[in-house]
Amino acid sequence: MSKDEITIRDFCRRTGQLVELDPGHFLLLPPPYDKLDIQPKFTRLSEENRKKLESDLDGVSALKFPRPQNEDEKRVLVEKFLSGLKKLFDRQENWTFMQPLFLTMEFCAKCQTCAAACPIYNESGRLDIYRPTFRSDILRRLYKKYVKTGGQFFAKLSGNDIDASWTMIARLMELSYRCTVCRRCAQSCPIGVDNGLVTRELRKIFSQEMGITVEPLHAKGSVNQLRTGSSTGMSRTPFLDNVEFLEEEVEERTGMKFKWPMDKAGADILLIHNAGEFLAWPENPEAFAIILEAAGISYTLSSDLCAYDGVNYGVWYDDVQFAKVALQHAEVARRLGVKKIVIGECGHAHKALTVIADRVFTGEHNIPRESSMTLLHEIIKSGRLKLDASRNDDMTTTLHDPCNLVRLMGVVEPQREVLRAVSNRFREMEPHGVNNYCCGGGSGFAITKDLNFPDFRNQISSRTKLRQILDVFQDIIEPEHKKYVCAPCSNCKGAMRDMFAAYGLFERCNILYGGLVELVVNAMVDIDKPFIEWEWH
Ligand code: SF4
Ligand code: SF4
C-alpha cells in the first residue's frame, strides 16, 4: 500500500490503481487478533476483473462498473455526470437535502476534526482518499467550477481547478461507496459540515442521472421490493406461508399458541419489520410477537406490497426509489386506519420512515411513526411483562448503537433501560450512545457481497466495531465465558454476521450477536425454556 500523500490532482490525473490495500498497514486489533496470521486475507480482484471493471481507486469494486470501451463512451458518461451535478444544486430537482448540501459546499475550515472521527480513514492506516473531506473537496471544486456563475474563470484563478475527466469520475463513483454514511464526521464538525451527506448526494448523481448503482441496493433491492413486496424477493404468499410456519415454531419453542394479527383494520399499531428478519433471524419477529401478545398491545402486521418489509434502500442512494417505497408504507397504514406505524429493529428503516419520510408525507399519509425501542420501553415500565433478569445471568451483554437510530434520531436511553431490566451483566462499549461507531455495514455495505467488497467491509469499515467488541469483553475474552452483542438493527446484524464469520468470533471467543427482544423473551418467567439458542447460525 502506498503511504505517499494522495492529492486531488493525483486522484484526477494519475493513471492505474491509486492505492493498494494491505492488512499489514491497517490499525492493530486487540487480542486474540493482534497477530496477522489469524486475520482474514484481503482478496485481490482477478487480473481479468481488473482489466474489465473500474477499480483504479483502491483495487476494490463495489459497483462492478465495466470500463468504457472508447473515448465517446467516456464523453457521454462525463456529460451525464455534469448534468446530474447541476441538478444536485437546483431547488426544483433536489427537494431533499439542498440546503445542508449547499452549506457544506460553501464552508469548511479545513481543521480535520472530522478525520479523527472517521473509522474508515483511521482503520485504513489513514489513507488520504478515505479522509471525510477528500470526496467533499472534490465535489466542492466541481460545484464551484461547473455550477456557480463564472466558475470556470475563478477556478483557474484560485488554483483549485479540476477537470471533470472520466478517470476522476470513475474513482469518485467507487469512493462514494467507501463511506458508511455513519455521520460521525458530521457530528464532530464544529461548523456543521456534513461529509456523510456528500457521499449520499454523490450516489444520487450516479443513480438518478447515470443509472449506476450497486446491484443489491437497486436491482435486487428497491426495484425488487416494489415488484414483489420485499427486497428479499419474498412475495405475499411465501410471506404468509413463512409466518404460519413461524407460528408453529413459536408454539414448539415456548408452548405458546398464537396467530399473528394480519391485515387487521383499525388496530392501534402497524408493526413493520425488516423482512430479512423472517428469513435470517426469525427469532426476532417471533420475540416481538410474544412480547406484544403478553402485553396486550393492539397491533397488526400487513401482507400488502412493501408493508411487510420496512427496508427502504433509497435512503442511501436515490430519492425517487426512496419516495416510492415510503409512500407504499404510508398508504397501507392509511388503508388499515391504524393510529401509528411502529418500526421493528431496523436502523435504516427508522431513518427512512421517520426523519426522511417527513420530507415526503403530507395530509392523510402523515401518520405518526414510532420506534419499537420506545414502545418496548413503555411496555417494560408498565410492568405488563413478568421478567427475571437473572435468567440472562449466564451471559455478559453489551449494546451496539445503530447510527440511524441513535446518532441521527437521538434514541439513546429507551433500549438501555430495557436491557438493564433484563440483563444484570450489561456493560457499555466505549464510546457509546451518539458517539458510537458504525457496525461497518451502514449505507448498504452489509448487503454488498460481490467480488472483494466484503474484505473492505470486514477488514476496514467494520474494524472499529470489532475492536470495541473485543475491548469491552477483553477480561473475559476466553471461550468459557458467554458474551452477547445486542444489536437492535437488521442491517447491523447482517454486517456482524459476516464480520463474526470472517474472524471466527463465535468459535474463538464465544461471542454471539442478536437483537434486544430476544433477551427480553429470554427473561420472561412465563416462558419455560431459554428462548436464545446459544449456537452459531
Ligand atoms: S468538515 Fe468540519 S471538521 Fe472537517 S475539516 Fe471541514 S470544518 Fe473541519
Ligand atoms: S460518514 Fe462516517 S464513514 Fe463516512 S466519512 Fe463520515 S465518519 Fe467516515
Image (cartoon, rainbow, N blue to C red):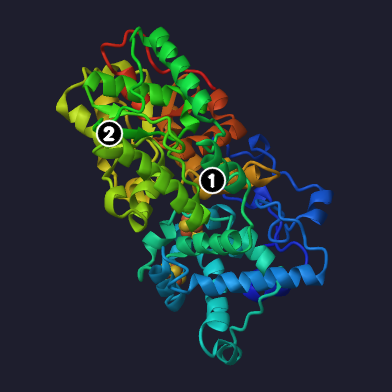
Residue found at x 61% / y 90%: 156
Residue type at the position of mark 2 = Ile
Task: Using the image, determine if residue 7 lies above or below residue 155.
Answer: above
Residue type at the position of mark 1 = Ser
Mark identifier at residue 222: 1
- Is 178 left, or right, of 434 in this rendering? right
Please, what secondary structure does the residue beneath circle 1 have? helix
Q: Please, which residue is most extreme toward the left here?
A: 382
Residue 146 in view of the camera: yes
Please, what secondary structure does the residue beneath circle 2 have? strand
Reading the image, the residue beneath label 2 is 269
Relative image position of residue 280 (x, y in whole percent): 52, 27
Residue 431 in view of the camera: no
6 or 89, which is in the foreground?
Answer: 89
- In terms of image quadrants, where is residue 471? top left
Precedes in sequence: disc 2 or disc 1: 1
Relative image position of residue 130 (x, y in whole percent): 57, 61
Q: Which quadrant would the C terminus be assigned to in this image?
A: top right
